[in-house]
Image (cartoon, rainbow, N blue to C red):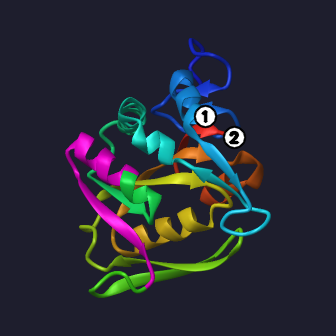
Amino acid sequence: MTDPDRDPGVTDPGGTDSGGGVAGDSAVASLVASRVVDVPDFPQPGIVFKDLSPLFADPVGFRTVVDAIVAGAGDGFEVVAGIEARGFVLSAAVAYAAGVGVVPVRKAGKLPRATYTATYALEYGEATLEVHRDAFASGQRVLVVDDVLATGGTARASLDLVERAGGVVTGVTFLVELGFLGGRDRLAGYPVRALLTA
């Protein structure tokens, strides 16, 4: 929801940014933008990889984005689900800051017990994710966190897994959204938030 007291293009950090632009505080968006390094042709030709390592390595920057994610999500979640792999970095920190638990959504074959599985198309191939069948209590409110929203395949598969395992998705947060790829469209019906839309 748009706050008329904020800059244009900036939405309420607790709401859903349903259009382009930046969700949350413009200072946080500027911080994220200043710490992202574009790596062309990685992991394969034609892909521009968003390297967030400089942001994760910056103690003030990392704390700022974690605090922004927690503040934007409010108290509407009981556990954080992090999507492999950089989503683990964020989800663990967000869960710690919020005083809740964390559940990993992993690549196929990485979890030791019975799982739910979802296979989906990437912008450069196909992948499979899994979550333990008992990862969530029935009806448990879940905030899903990942680094980048591109085409939305990874996020969509993760939301499906959370719900199949009994969780209720109350929000989905990304550091960076690549708006030109339209990934948000695949997440229609969920409260989606990105700290920076590129």
Q: Quadrant of the C terminus?
A: top right
Which residue, given by chain and number where applicable, does mark 2 sit on? Answer: 198
> Is residue 116 toward the left or the right of residue 135 in the image?
right
N-terminal of the pair, mark 2 or mark 1, is: 1
Compared to 46, does 128 lie above or below? below
Magenta residues, as a range? 90-108
- Whether residue 113 appears in this view of the structure is yes
Q: Nearer the viewer, residue 170 or 82?
A: 82
Give the x, y percent position of residue 133. Answer: 31, 80
Category of crowding for the residue at label 1, using alpha-carbon neighbours closer than 10 angstroms: few (below 14), some (14–19), many (at least 20):
some
Residue drawn at x 60%, y 37% as measured from the top left = 196
Q: Is residue 188 magenta?
A: no
> Residue 85, position in %: x, y?
45, 64
x 33%, y 43%: residue: 76
Amino acid type shown at disc 2? Ala
Q: Which residue is mark 1?
A: 33
> Secondary structure beneath disc 2?
loop
x and y, in percent, of residue 181 in the image: 75, 55
Q: Looking at the image, do the residues carrying marks 2 and 1 touch, with CB atoms under 8 Å apart?
A: yes
Q: Amino acid at mark 1?
A: Ala
